[in-house]
Amino acid sequence: EDFISLNIFCAPCMKTRAWAKLNLTLDVLGKREDGYHDLCMVMQSVTLHDTLTLTPNEGQGLRVKTNLRFLPTGEKNLAAAAALRFWEALGREPEHLDIEIQKRIPVCAGMAGGSSDAAAVLRALNELAGSPFTPTELAKVGEKVGSDVPYCVLGGTALAEGRGEVLTPLPALPPCWVVACKPDFPISTPELFARIDSCKIRCRPDTAGMLEALKAGSLEEVARRMYNVFEDVLPERYQARVAEIKHVLIQKGALGANMSGTGPTAFGLFDSEEAAREAQAALQEGYRDTFLCRSV
Ligand code: C5P
């Protein structure tokens, strides 16, 4: 089982990383009885990450602190929810723990930042407890925290189906440079799901072709097949801004560009570091949240 574990013990605390995810493909297959949607997505983790520090405290309960003031500090924070689910699954009382999160992954960006923090907490607590859960079992614990959490527990390149929790590991994305850019407007995930319910999806990603391209190890073929059905249902003014970012990425030499998740982050894949750096520089002029990273 492929499992990224890069936890650093610094007794009595633990420092760990939460990688951002990007969607190489995203397809919505239909609405389910439980209100969720059946999805089919190829996911990829990248080196852009939050850093979490877990430190036991003296009887103050479970507390979350982040460098972003507007994020919830209590159980509404997915990192705290994950810790509670972990102890519940172990049949243990909640512990007294401080979770400090240094956020770098932009919030509400389609990069699973919150889910990734939750997954990092699950991995860290599991390691601290002597690994009572296998990675697959730990992913299952994450299901109750959020649809993207199971994938974030496992990471790497994977096919995610069902709500997002049915995972199949895939051949790794060929090494490349990634430039991700989040324009400065908010997108509501439930709202975008509602928009997709109200219209007919005309174009879909060629997921089978994407799987073939990954198997063949061809970055060009992967990049060419990236597609996200949510891009077609963005409100028009937002659609134009995402298209503009993708245009800059391609102009600067990206082999392909795509929106991630429900957006608004768009990213490009590059086989040249120089081209990627130029794209980053160009986008940084207009967008503060521009990142150069690599696949994990
Ligand atoms: O599972 P999570 O809380 O991350 O999902 C957030 C929202 O995204 C859900 O309330 C739902 O509106 C939508 N969603 C969905 N189908 C999925 C995943 C998420 O409709 N497979």
Image (cartoon, rainbow, N blue to C red):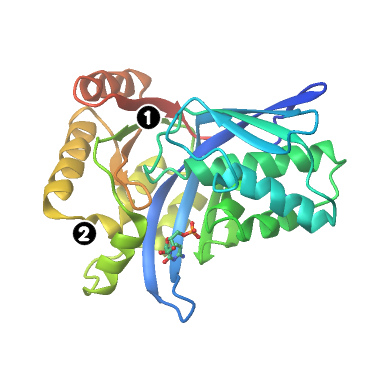
Q: Position of residue 23 (x, y in %)?
A: 41, 49
Q: Is residue 155 visible?
A: no
Residue 52 visible in rendering: yes
- The span from disc 2 to disc 1 (Cα, nearest Å) is 27 Å
- Give the quarter of the image for residue 185: top left
User: Which element carries disc 2, helix, strand or loop?
Assistant: helix
The image quarter containing residue 11 is: top right
**Viewer-nearest residue: 121 or 56:** 56
Disc 2 target residue:
232
In primary-sequence order, the first of circles 2 and 1 is 2
Tell me: 200 left or right of 219: left
**Does 255 sit left or right of 81 as displayed?**
left
Q: What quarter of the picture does the C terminus occupy?
A: top right
Which residue is disc 1 drawn over? 271
- The residue positioned 24% from the left and 33% from the top of the image is 249
Residue type indicated by callout 1: Asp
Q: Position of residue 251 (x, y in %)?
A: 17, 31
Estimate the x, y position of residue 277 in percent, counting from the top left. Answer: 32, 19
Q: Amino acid at mark 2?
A: Asp
Q: Residues within 10 Å of mark 1 (few under 14, many from 20)?
A: some
Circle 2 packing at 10 Å, graded few (<14), some (14-19), many (20+), is some
